[in-house]
Image (cartoon, helix red, strand yellow):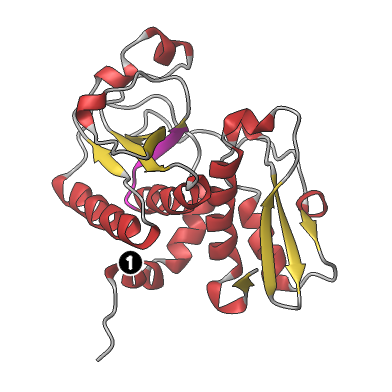
Amino acid sequence: MEEVRNDEIIHDNLNMTLQEAIKNRHSVRQYLDKPIEAEKIAQLQEFICECNRDGGLHIQLVTNEPKAFAGGMAKYGKFSGISNYIAMVCKKGDDVNLGYYGEKVVLLAQTLGLNTCWVGLTFKKQPDQYEVRGGEKLVCVVSIGYGANQGVQHPQKKTLNDVAEGKPYPDWFVRGVEAALLAPTAVNQQLFRFILRDGNKVEAKKAFSLTGGMGYALIDLGIAKCHFEIGAGKENFAWF
């Protein structure tokens, strides 16, 4: 009998919930002093392990650790109440993969009733709280917990025609791009493009920018690919 992986069960059972999570998830910077339940931590840990295995990554959940967001940088970024976060660690050159799988974890957290925020600079590294092996790097972290609010949707700067190529677009492609346009990106730049090729093949690539996407454009591309795949449906296309 073919083995059915737990991440496949999660995604099959929560497919519509994940689509709703894309629409409902907003970046949250202020959190309540409320611990994450043990069963939810266990679900996150299990899924993170599967993402690490499948993606060759080293993502780690850090709990009950308030020091990363206790300094002046965090206050400057208007972060407060954070004692849990996800350390986004990968091998150098694996940023797209990290964004793709990291956003899978973020969306699972949303389905569990938790709030999150991708954080690039406004935190203090705590090397004793997570492991960074030789050849790896800590790219960023994701705050996680119960938000003091649910955040707000940033205005979309771009439309389908701004980030897509290969008309005419089938419905599944449009749904995928619409989901990608809801993906969190550094300073909301949305530096990605989706190109339809050969009917059902899709190429995702980083768009050019003078700012270089604040150094996070490849992470953002991976996040957008995750959203596109959920919106379009994996059964409808293949990555080019």
Compare residues 24 and 11 and report the one nearer the observer.
11
Kind of element beneath mark 1: helix
Farthest front residue in view: 134
In the depicted structure, whether residue 99 falls above or below residue 185: below
Quadrant in the picture for the C terminus: bottom right
In the depicted structure, whether residue 131 falls above or below residue 175: above
Compare residues 85 and 50 and report the one nearer the observer.
50
Q: In which quarter of the image is residue 153?
A: top right
Compare residues 148 and 73 and report the one nearer the observer.
73
Farthest right residue in view: 167
Q: Which residue is pictured at 26% across the width and 51% down the height?
A: 44
Q: Where is residue 176 in the image (x, y as percent from the top left)?
A: 64, 62
Residue numbers of the magenta segment? 112-118
Does the stretch in magenta take in 116? yes
Position of 186 with respect to 53 (left or right) is right
Q: Can residue 187 be seen in this view?
A: no
Q: Name the residue under label 1.
A: 7
Q: Quadrant of residue 128?
A: top left
Q: Which amino acid does label 1 sit on?
A: Asp
Q: Where is residue 229 in the image (x, y as percent from the top left)?
A: 56, 64
Q: Which residue is pictured at 36% across the width and 62% down the height?
A: 54
Does the stretch in magenta take in 188? no
In the depicted structure, whether residue 76 falls above or below residue 101: above
Q: Which residue is pictured at 45% across the width and 59% down the height?
A: 18
Farthest left residue in view: 38
Farthest bottom residue in view: 1
Q: Which residue is pictured at 32% across the width and 72% down the height?
A: 9
Q: Position of residue 73 (x, y in %)?
A: 43, 12
Q: Position of residue 150 (x, y in %)?
A: 45, 36
Q: Residues within 10 Å of mark 1 (few under 14, many from 20)?
A: some
In the depicted structure, whether residue 169 falls above or below residue 86: below
